[in-house]
Image (cartoon, rainbow, N blue to C red):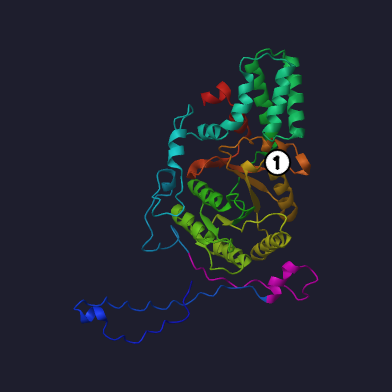
Amino acid sequence: MFSFFKRKKAPAPQESALAQDGIPDAPEIPDAPEVAPVAPTELPETWTADAAGPGAHASAEAPPAAAEPVSEFVSGVGPAPADAPAQPPDAWSDRPDESADPLARLDLSAKESAASASAPAGSWLGRLRRGLSRTGQSLGGLFTGVKVDETLFEELETALIMADAGVEATEKLLAELRARVKRQRIEQPEAVRAALRDILAEHLKVLEKPFVVGEAAPMVVMIAGVNGAGKTTSIGKLAHALRERKASVLLAAGDTFRAAAREQLVAWGARNGVTVIAQEGGDPAAVAFDAVNAGRARSADVVLVDTAGRLPTQLHLMEELKKIKRVIGKADAAAPHEVLLVVDGNTGQNALAQIRAFDAALGLTGLVVTKLDGTAKGGTLAAVAAGSQGVRPVPVYWIGVGEGMQDLQPFVAAEFADALLGGPEAAKG
């Protein structure tokens, strides 16, 4: 909190009883210097009224006033702060200094125990298999010491539904599996597993799409999601992944509501060596507007815009999200080029409701599925691919299975299907 008033000095006290006894008084503590408050930039009345609806204001919209960045870290573009720690971009992938970094909350004991798994500890496929191990065990364990008969298909149906694959996807997958087993006269359970893996990979192929950078300069990516889905952390990991691919990145701290959200994104920016545009409080639309202009001025390849978490049932907050998208379009008529929704993989079928609501409000172009490690609901993507509950099969750009920098990787349907089914085939990679 900023101090607006200087404390008044108390009148000089008379000589204390301690001093009379020969014991000196404690030295007087000087007053703290005054700190001038930073006033956040707000949008004009004609601009902020547009979220209220078409009948709220009749005047034309004006572009938002520029917001002076309060916190900015630049690496490779300009001089870095003198007190900024010199760290390599991939420092997060090793053992961070938890006392120096507020983001360093890795469970190192769990990380070390996971490294003893059969798959190679350093490979992405190994981490993906370990992350989906709970779902893989419930599905892959069905193929051990059994006959290929109707009982196996019934158990597979139950396991797929329990993994939140949904009724539509389960019926489609098992219908194709039955037909293939009959057509190819498959009698070995491991061959049935291989057939199901291929069918599942083909089913998920509709969600596989590369994240292409370079078609726009800068490429503006707006990122939304519910509270606690992992938006800010995913933005930090995504910035790291793009930096590894030699793309210049700029971050916009548009979450001006949650406490310490700005500081968290600034810490991620410092760790990745990228610029962060932020302001103390204020309108998130103004932050997004400034970030797009700053990205164009700095010739950045990608601008990642963070937004505050919100539930799709909070209609006034969904209207604010629509406003942020409109303001980004004022800075760049073609922006945002991508609108991503971060989905918590642990939410199961609830993820379908989130995708449907945010897609209706923003027109999603892609998904980032996080926290797949440790969940038994890894079949949710099969439900998305099948269009369950009226959901459009939105492409999945990235999936995350841990808290490390390298634990967010592009979605590949064949890899995901292989990891989801577990068993001997999964242990070979």
The x, y position of residue 47, in whole percent, is: 69, 72
Helix, strand or loop for the magenta stretch, by majority: loop
Query: Which quarter of the picture shows residue 395?
Result: top right
The amino acid marked with disc number 1 is Gln
- Asked if residue 358 lies in the magenta stretch, the reply is no
- Asked if residue 48 lies in the magenta stretch, the reply is yes
The x, y position of residue 54, in whole percent, is: 79, 69
| Mark 1 neighbour density, 10 Å: few (under 14) some (14–19) many (20 or more) | many
Viewer-side residue, 378 vs 67: 378
Check disc 1 and report its element: helix, strand or loop. Answer: loop
The x, y position of residue 17, in whole percent, is: 25, 80
Viewer-side residue, 109 vs 117: 109
State left or right for residue 408 relative to residue 90. right
Q: Is residue 124 above or below residue 318?
A: above
Residue visible at 68% across and 32% down in the picture: 162
Query: Which quarter of the picture shows residue 411?
Result: top right
The x, y position of residue 87, in whole percent, is: 38, 52
Q: How many discs appear?
A: 1
Q: Residue 421, can we see it?
A: no
Provide the residue designation for mark 1: 349
Residue positioned most to the left: 22
State left or right for residue 1 relative to residue 292. left
Q: Residue 94, can we see it?
A: yes
